[in-house]
Image (cartoon, rainbow, N blue to C red):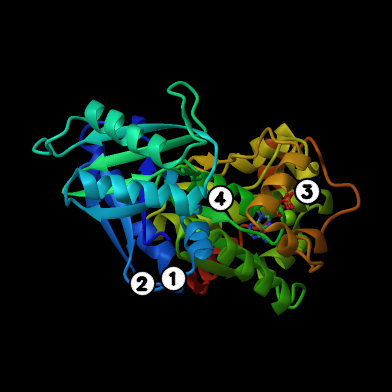
Amino acid sequence: MFKAFLIKYGEIAIKGKNRYLFEDALVSQIRHALKETEGSFCVTKEQGRIYVEALSDYDYEEAVDALKRVFGIVGICPVVILEDEGFERLAEEAVKYLKTRYGDCSKTFKVHARRAKKTYPLQSMEVNAQLGGRILDSFPGMRVDVHNPEIMLHVEIRERIYLYSDVIPGPGGMPVGTNGKSMLLLSGGIDSPVAGYMVAKRGVKIDAVYFHAPPYTSERAKQKVVDLAAKVALYAGPIYLYVVNFTDIQLYIYEKCPHEELTIIMRRYMMRIAEEIARKTGSLGLITGESIGQVASQTVQSLAATNEVCTMPVFRPLIAFDKEDIVTLSKKIDTFETSIQPFEDCCTIFVAKHPVTKPNIKVIRHSETKLAEKIDAMVKEAVETAELIVVG
Ligand code: ATP
Ligand code: MG
């Protein structure tokens, strides 16, 4: 029954001149999300409102699901749009709307009219009263409840008239593209896709980097990361995924440094390389799925040692989350099933039996001096030969 949606978005974040940025980014994200669906749609911005109108047949559930993934949307209201052909016609359509939507029900209701078009002959209060009367006449079982109605019938009078009573919750957050860009270190695990989702929800555009160690890690492991990026891209928009060949660097560290420090040193090189690519491609921060205490390389001491090599801010949205809560989120955004596919991970292949859990930064720096001969050239080559895959 619906050919259009009215999109509600948060008002707090969009004071002043941010409003245009916010709305334009939201319109463009909505267009992108709907492109994946079957129908064709027109998305317009009009006096502090965004409307989505179907120009063709479309799948209602699919369109609503796509809109539910657009950050910045607070509510999705399926609307009936009428031409302004006088109050009589409005009353008929409103009754028809309620019949189709709710049947001959006995619910409580309230009419909430808003007259944006000041030349309309009735004031909002008059529309409320007169339309309320018509509804009572047409539905013997319905009653008015102005405080806590079961049905709130919104009537927005603009150039055209918009009727709606449902508000489907959107994801909230801010439209991607309103807060710069950051580089997500995306592994095949559970945590990093969730971290990317969370930062994208704050309006940050996401690029990603994956450290691949062939032949120790397989093409299937890489494909899993591409699949995860595609899942995150359903929310975050297209993701530029850089696949870095990390094998030689890992082997070199393995050869030159104490094995119990391997993970930390490897993590430090991942951060350095990610930052280098980030800088070249316009990202302003790094994002990881780290969480305090989850594994040996995520004690506070280890995080400090990893962090030391970065000059960009590192966003760790999961830092204080329990694993259980991360899993719940990963199920919600549908990355969990992909994340738990059993493919090898480059961090686990070279892992020592007893990795240091409280690395001393001075000791780590000293170990890294043993890499001096070749490491700069290797890092340079890793950055330069990174494979770019555009996902989503
Ligand atoms: P995840 O579930 O995200 O893999 P994890 O709990 O396995 O995290 P680690 O393996 O210590 O933790 O990795 C910590 C973070 O480092 C990851 O969340 C991710 O951001 C980054 N990371 C680890 N391995 C890789 C990789 N191969 N490529 C890109 N980033 C990685
Ligand atoms: Mg991992």
Q: What residue type is labelled 2?
A: Ser
Q: Which of 307 and 176 is in front in this view?
A: 176
Report whether 255 appears left or right of 90: right
Image quadrant assignment for residue 382: bottom right
Q: What residue type is labelled 3?
A: Glu
The residue depicted at 49 percent of the width and 60 percent of the height is 66
Q: Classify mark 3: residues with Cα within 10 Å, few (<14), some (14-19) or many (20+).
A: many
Q: Is residue 311 above or below residue 347?
A: above
Nearest to N terminus: mark 2 or mark 1: 2
From where the camera sits, is residue 182 visible? no
Nearest to N terminus: mark 3 or mark 4: 4
Mark 3 CB near ligand 1 (8 Å cut): no
Residue carrying label 3: 261
Q: What element carries label 2?
A: loop
Nearest to N terminus: mark 4 or mark 1: 1
Q: Which mark is residue 58?
A: 1
- Marks 1 and 2: in contact by CB < 8 Å? yes
Residue carrying label 2: 40
Where residue 186 appears, as percent x and y from the top left, is 61, 58
Residue carrying label 4: 197
Q: Nearer the viewer, residue 269 or 298?
A: 298
Q: In front: mark 2 or mark 1?
A: 1
Q: In front: mark 4 or mark 1?
A: 1
Quadrant of the rendering where the N terminus is positioned: bottom left
Where residue 358 appears, as percent x and y from the top left, is 78, 35
| Direction right: furthest residue | 353
Where residue 326 appears, as percent x and y from the top left, is 71, 44
Q: What element carries label 3?
A: helix
Disc 2/disc 1 C-alpha distance (Å): 7 Å
